[in-house]
Amino acid sequence: MVTGESVDTGPTQPDVAVVGGGPIGWAIAWRCATRGLRVVVHDPAPGSGASQVAAGMLAPVAEAYFGERELTGLLTESASRWPGFAAELTEATGVDIGYRTEGTLMVGLTADDLAEARRLWAYQQGLGLPVTPLRPSQLREREPALAPRVRGGALAATDHQVDPRRLVPALRLAAERAGAVLVAEPVRWLSEITAGVTVVAAGCGAAALTGLPVRPVKGQVLRLRAPDGAPPGFRHVIRGYADGEHVYLVPRECGEVVVGATVEERSDLEVSAGAVLRLLRAAVDLLPEIAEYDLVETTAGLRPGTPDNAPILGPLPGHPGVLVAAGHHRHGIVLTPVTADLITDLVTGGGGPEPLLAPFRPDRFGDLPGGVGVTATGSTFQPATEVDTWN
Ligand SMILES: Cc1cc2nc3c(=O)[nH]c(=O)nc-3n(C[C@H](O)[C@H](O)[C@H](O)COP(=O)(O)OP(=O)(O)OC[C@H]3O[C@@H](n4cnc5c(N)ncnc54)[C@H](O)[C@@H]3O)c2cc1C
């Protein structure tokens, strides 16, 4: 679309305008700016979207669900790019983004929980994904803090984690160091933008701007802190089934543990007592010691969901010069590297047709609703700032 050299299109017109300063937008801005393009990022509240709440699991194996083969392929590809991406970002910024590689333990509390988990592990193994079943004694060797009641588990050694609250500022710093510029205002209409290429990376905000079927899927999350500034008493990400409840616990070096998450077809940011109760009960059932931790934050965020749970990547039908990188739903952190690379290749016209992109094109949803598009759609953007924080 534009060449690797910066195009002289006038004194104020950028080569690339990115709408949205979440992980996806900043990563694309960074990649484009390092290729010598003039990049602006439009966002009145960068980093305030779903990434502010996200746990940061990089879990293509544990998140390989029935009926999502193509998505699993993209997740796996992106996860394989994470080590290099993390190293490059740390090199560019000096920021510790909390990238950790201890792996993920998937566990079942009761016999029923374990039976449910085993069905999924069998499916994942059938795809050739690295899932290693562990006996209870092996589980406890790895994580002595697990409850004695936990019946069994499996290791997904290649499922890692990163801290999104460190990642997004680091991506912004890298992009700005490479020359990208923030315009701290919302985009209401894509027709407001004058740039060689516009990339819509606005998370849930992409729906109003493009008419594509991106919908908010609410997730409530808790943050706990180990006592006395100590690190948590476990090292792996723990994903479990506990009396039918699904829960995950993500330990950070700084002592924080992220416990999540609800999945609700709602668009408010309220935190409910019932959700806190269910998450805490399931988490304490798996790791009793966290009952002694401080509960420091309860938050809700909105995942940018799509009808097939997969992201929307590529040209917006009927609108030359507009690309979409949105709808990353539960996977926007793990999908950041591959999204940035593929979209930057589209922006620069490099790489030729990309088979990886084919299943995720915006036109897979058919015609957009009549009247919707770059000249007819108005964003009613509201920054997501209403979080309920304790302490
Ligand atoms: C509870 C929860 C847990 C999660 N856990 C994980 C996880 O463990 N691993 C994982 O990979 N993913 C996880 N996710 C998903 C992940 O957070 C998202 O997929 C990811 O943040 C999407 O990135 P994004 O940049 O597209 O959107 P967002 O992070 O939502 O950012 C969108 C940005 O666009 C801006 N914006 C919106 N509209 C406009 C507009 N009109 N003009 C200008 N700017 C605009 C917003 O201000 C915001 O800064 C989780 C999400 C939630 C809610």
Image (tube, rainbow, N blue to C red):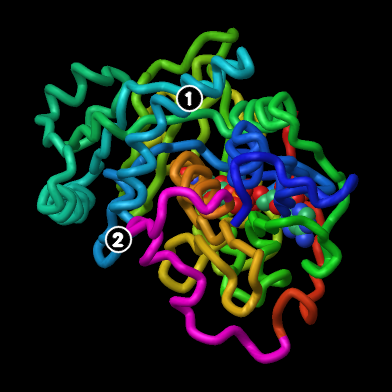
Q: Is residue 189 above or below residue 220?
A: below
Label number found at residue 86: 1
Give residue 73's position: percent from left, percent from top: 29, 52
Q: Is residue 179 left or right of residue 311?
A: right
Q: Residue at x 60, y 18 (%)?
A: 92
Q: Is residue 163 left or right of residue 153?
A: right
The question of residue 364 being in magenta is answered with: yes
Q: Can you tell me whether the CB of the residue at mark 2 lies under 8 Å from the nearest atom of ligand 1?
A: no
- Residue 50 appears anywhere in the view: no
Q: CA distance from mark 1 to mark 2?
A: 24 Å
**Depth check: 150 or 23 in front?**
23
Q: Residue at x 37, y 19 (%)?
A: 234
**Image marks 1 and 2: residues in contact by CB distance under 8 Å:** no
**Depth check: 43 or 356 in front?**
356
Q: Secondary structure at mark 2?
A: helix
Give residue 79's position: percent from left, percent from top: 36, 38
Label number found at residue 70: 2
**Depth check: 61 or 200 in front?**
200
Q: Which residue type does callout 2 highlight?
A: Glu
Q: Is residue 153 above or below residue 302?
A: above
- Residue 358 appears anywhere in the view: yes
Q: Secondary structure at mark 1?
A: helix
- Which residue lies most toward the bottom here? 370
Give residue 26's position: percent from left, percent from top: 65, 40
- Quarter holding the C terminus is top right
Query: Which of the 4 quarters of the picture holds residue 323?
Result: bottom right
The question of residue 88 being in magenta is answered with: no
Q: Residue at x 18, y 43 (%)?
A: 129
Query: Which of the 4 quarters of the picture holds residue 136?
Result: top left
Q: Please provide the residue range marked out in magenta.
A: 348-371
- Quarter holding the N terminus is bottom right
